[in-house]
Image (cartoon, coloured by chain):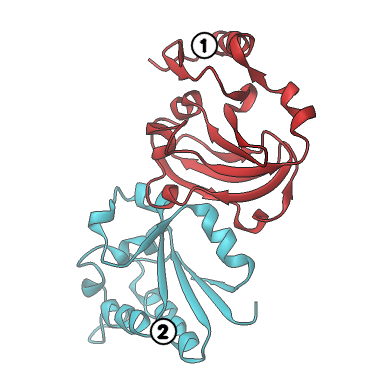
Chain colours: A cyan, B red
C-alpha cells in the first residue's frame, strides 16, 4: 500500500464542481512518485466519452475538465473504465478517448487491494 | 461434440454440472478450466468482463472456491475451481475480449489453468463421458434450459 494510489471516480457531467479535484489529486500523487490509477464508474465514465470533458466546467469561467484530465494523463496516471458502467450509459470502446483500459468491476477490488483508495 | 437441447457439449471433458464449468487435463500437471455453452446462454449471451483472481495465482485454490469472476448484465458471479490445485494463470485474451468465453467456450475462450493436487480423487466427482452427458441432459431438462 505504500506506493500505489487508486482513485475511484463516480462523479460526472451532472455534478461539474466534483469533476476537477479527483484528477488534480491524481496528478499530485503522480508528482509525489506514487503509481496512480483511476477507476471510472457510474457517471465518471461519461467524462471519458470523446468530446465530453471539454464541455464540463467545474468553475464558471475556469478550466474545463479536459485540462485536468490531460494533466493527469501527462503525469502518467493510468485510466481504467468499468465495463458495467459503459453498459449503463450505452457506451462502446469506440466512444471513449484513447488509452482507456476497460476492465470489469472485479478489477476495482484487485486494484484497491494494494493501493490507497479514494472515492469521488 | 454432442448437442443437448441446442447446447454444444464436448464428449471428452469433465463437467461440474451445477456450476456449468468444464475441466480438461492438458498433461499430468495442467488442467484447463472454462465455462460451458450453457453458462454462456444463462449469462444472457454477452459478457462485460471475465477477471482472473490475480492474488490467487501461484496459490492453492480449494475445489469450489473462485478462480475468476464473470460479469454480464444478467449474471455476476464466480467461476468456481472444479478441482483443488494451484492456480497457474488466466487466459490473457479475455481481458480484451471477454466474449470469447461465449463464442469459443472450449477453445480460445478458456478461463484458467490449474495444477491439480487431488485429480485422481476429485475427477470421480465430475461428470464425464456418455454417462456425464446424460446427467447434464437431466439437469438441463429439470431446469428447462436450452441454448436454442
Rendered image quadrant of residue A65: bottom left
Disc 2: which residue: A24
**Residue nearest the viewer, comparing A106 with A85:** A106
Disc 1: which residue: B144
Tell me what residue is drawn at x 47 percent, y 86 percent: A30
**Residue nearest the viewer, comparing A58 with A99:** A99
Q: Residues within 10 Å of mark 2 (few under 14, many from 20)?
A: some
Secondary structure at badge 2 equals helix
Secondary structure at badge 1 equals loop
**Residue nearest the viewer, comparing B107 with B61:** B107
Q: Residues within 10 Å of mark 1 (few under 14, many from 20)?
A: few
Tell me what residue is drawn at x 74 percent, y 49 percent: B60
Q: Position of residue A61 (x, y in %)?
A: 22, 86
Q: Is residue B109 above or below residue B90?
A: above
Q: Position of residue B90 (x, y in %)?
A: 54, 49
Does residue B50 appear left or right of residue A4 in this picture? left
Q: Nearer the viewer, mark 2 or mark 1?
A: 1
Tell me what residue is drawn at x 56 percent, y 20 percent: B12
Q: In the rendered view of the protein, which quadrant contains the N terminus of chain A?
A: bottom right
Q: Is residue B16 above or below residue B65?
A: above
Q: Is residue A115 above or below residue A67?
A: above
Task: Tell me which chain the residue with mark 1 is part of.
Answer: B
Amino acid at each position: 500500500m505504500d506506493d500505489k494510489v487508486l482513485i475511484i471516480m463516480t462523479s460526472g457531467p451532472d455534478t461539474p464542481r466534483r469533476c476537477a479535484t479527483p484528477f488534480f489529486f491524481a496528478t499530485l500523487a503522480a508528482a509525489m512518485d506514487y503509481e496512480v490509477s483511476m477507476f471510472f464508474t457510474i457517471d465518471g465514465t461519461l467524462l471519458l466519452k470523446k468530446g465530453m470533458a471539454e464541455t464540463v466546467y467545474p468553475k464558471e469561467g475556469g478550466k474545463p475538465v479536459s485540462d485536468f484530465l490531460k494533466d493527469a494523463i501527462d503525469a502518467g496516471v493510468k485510466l481504467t473504465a468499468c465495463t458495467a458502467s459503459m453498459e449503463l450509459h450505452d457506451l462502446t470502446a469506440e466512444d471513449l478517448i484513447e488509452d482507456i483500459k476497460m476492465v470489469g468491476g472485479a478489477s476495482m477490488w484487485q486494484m484497491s487491494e494494494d493501493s490507497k483508495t479514494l472515492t469521488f | 461434440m454432442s448437442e443437448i437441447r441446442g447446447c454444444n457439449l464436448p464428449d471428452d471433458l469433465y463437467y461440474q454440472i451445477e456450476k456449468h464449468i468444464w475441466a480438461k487435463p492438458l498433461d499430468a500437471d495442467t488442467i484447463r478450466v472454462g465455462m460451458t455453452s450453457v453458462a454462456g446462454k444463462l449469462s444472457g449471451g454477452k459478457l462485460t468482463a471475465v477477471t482472473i483472481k490475480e492474488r490467487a495465482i501461484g496459490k492453492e485454490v480449494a475445489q469450489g472456491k473462485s478462480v475468476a469472476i464473470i460479469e454480464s448484465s444478467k449474471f455476476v458471479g464466480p467461476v468456481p475451481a472444479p478441482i483443488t490445485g494451484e492456480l497457474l494463470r488466466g487466459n490473457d485474451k479475455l481481458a480484451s475480449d471477454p466474449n470469447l468465453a461465449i463464442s469459443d467456450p472450449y477453445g480460445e475462450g478458456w478461463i484458467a489453468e490449474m495444477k491439480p493436487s487431488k485429480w485422481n480423487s476429485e475427477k470421480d466427482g465430475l461428470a464425464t463421458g456418455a454417462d456425464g452427458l446424460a446427467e447434464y441432459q437431466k439437469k438441463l431438462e429439470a431446469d428447462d434450459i436450452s441454448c436454442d
